[in-house]
Amino acid sequence: MRAEVHGAALELDESYLDADPETVRERVREYERGDRTAFDVEVAYPDTFTGRVMRAMSEIPYGETRTYGELAAELDTSPVAVGQACGRNPVPLVVPCHRVVGAGGRLVGFSAEGGVELKRRLLDGEAANRQTKLATFE
């Protein structure tokens, strides 16, 4: 299925999601508006290395990032292997591979349409929304 976010199309393999396409699209629209910080759909993680990386990515909180190296250390593998698994993520955004960055916070790689520029917009939007929400509770 295709979903639009920040003017770019995401290809999501709906067979990994326990939600109908319209529900997923609506949640993407809510995310884009800043009304949603989690997708709240069950994900069928593959029983593969990619599935292990996807589970680790799904644990990265909204508005935060982890480096490929940090995930690699957690999973006892290499940053390159983590990057390759990120590129195979069948449900980008729902499993937030955009929150995985290079050493020093460098924005590298994003397999969705819009590439690194879309990754930047997603991260910038999350950071701004997170700051707004934190300020509301202070």
Image (spheres, rainbow, N blue to C red):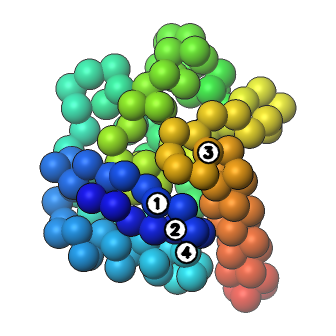
Residue at image point 44% right, 26% down: 85
Label pair 2/1, CB-CB below 8 angstroms: no
Label pair 2/3, CB-CB below 8 angstroms: no
Residue at image point 70% right, 34% down: 108
C-alpha distance separating marks 4 and 1 = 13 Å
Horizontal and vertical percent for residue 10?
43, 56
Residue located beneath label 1 in the image = 9
Asked which secondary structure carries label 4, the reply is helix
Label pair 3/1, CB-CB below 8 angstroms: no
C-alpha distance separating marks 3 and 4 = 17 Å
Q: Is residue 82 left or right of residue 124?
A: left
What type is the residue that disc 3 sits on? Gly
- Badge 2 local density, few (<14 within 10 Å), some, or many (20+)? many
Residue 54 sits above or below residue 18 on the image: above
Asked which secondary structure carries label 3, the reply is helix
Horizontal and vertical percent for residue 50?
35, 26
First of labels 2, 3 by sequence position: 2
Q: Residue furthest right?
A: 104
Residue located beneath label 2 in the image = 5
Asked which secondary structure carries label 2, the reply is strand
Residue located beneath label 4 in the image = 32
First of labels 4, 1 by sequence position: 1
Residue 91 sits above or below residue 86 on the image: below
Residue located beneath label 3 in the image = 115
First of labels 4, 2 by sequence position: 2
Label pair 4/2, CB-CB below 8 angstroms: yes
Q: Is residue 86 left or right of residue 124?
A: left
C-alpha distance separating marks 2 and 3 = 12 Å
